[in-house]
Image (cartoon, rainbow, N blue to C red):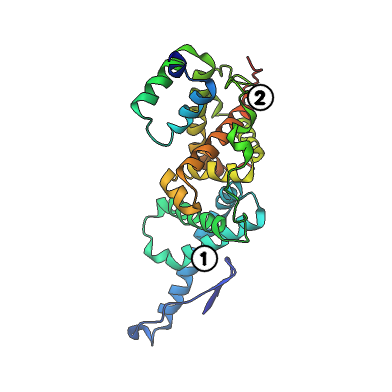
Amino acid sequence: MWENASLGIKVKMRSASPRSNFRDTDRESRVTEQDEHAQDLEAHRKYLQRYALFHLRDPSLAEDAVQDTLVAALAQRERFQGRSQLRTWLTGILKHKIIDLTRSRGRGLPADAFALGEDDESAGGAFNAKGRWVDPPADWRMPDAALESSQFWKVYQECCRHMSKRDALVFSMREVMGLSSEEICKKIEISTTNLHVILFRARLSLRTCMSKNWFGVRPD
Amino acid sequence: MIHKLIDSCAHAAQLSSRAMEQPLTPAERLRLKMHLMMCKRCSNFSRQIQFLRRASGKLPEIFEKDED
């Protein structure tokens, strides 16, 4: 076992091949290589942390997800060839870790976390009894221009935090992680119908929040 | 019968949202189209949730930026 100082974990070294039994430099260079790999991976920690924290909302859970990701990545590092896509690969591992954490009972979310409640039937009060808008959506001018503004993204993330934990997670799995409906339904064990209800709620919530807090629109 | 052809905004909004996960039936598509043609509010809603999808997809790029 060999401890990597950067990641603070013990990584099992591949056993030396017979040919290099008598060549210490070979083993040394493998240690240096591992060190380099670990450092490469460390460079992505901040990005991974932000990504995980957005989805999980709990800093210590996010830290676990990131740590698990880096450990897994280090163990498989030699299998991964394309340096330029390292971040994409790491994100892929992180996505799986995030999903695992949301599924495990007793951590992250309780067992019935994705169940629908009474409030869901009425789309959280967005419509009155006749099915008309309570806060009718008014026009947003040139919304794509907003994507250039860092303040926009702060408001966006803040609005996501306003969603219920359930809605936020399902929304981020679908819209940020880009999982398909089928994948989400399978991973968190909900029906397609429930998924649609939750996403509808999440979209209503986010749209209203952004309308008020960024696009500065007062309802029609 | 006519009331069945005109959807409420609640239903139209729901269809707009669901269409982002799976294709609507031809009947649903037609009813939604009719409603959107006549309803500016629901047209806004539909456009805005699609914009928010575009934005959400770009969020990982934002995490890449160094500023805190």
Q: Quadrant of residue B65?
A: top right
Q: Quadrant of residue A132?
A: top right
In the rendered view, tell whether residue A173 sits above or below residue A41: above
Between A206 and B14, the one lying in front of the other is B14
Please tell me if label 2 and label 1 are on a single chain: yes
**Which residue was labeled with disc 1?**
A71
Mark nearer the N terminus (2 vs 1): 1
Q: Quadrant of residue A7?
A: bottom right
Residue at 66 percent of width and 38 percent of height: A162
Q: Whole-percent x and y of residue B50?
A: 48, 28
Residue lying furthest bottom: A22
Q: Amino acid at mark 1?
A: Val
Residue at 41 percent of width and 19 percent of height: B33
**Which residue was labeled with disc 2?**
A212
Between A153 and A133, the one lying in front of the other is A133
Q: Whole-percent x and y of residue A149?
A: 58, 29
Q: Chain of mark 2?
A: A
Q: Secondary structure at mark 2?
A: helix
Q: Amino acid at mark 2?
A: Lys
Residue at 35 percent of width and 82 percent of height: A17
Q: Whole-percent x and y of residue A12?
A: 48, 76
Q: Secondary structure at mark 1?
A: helix
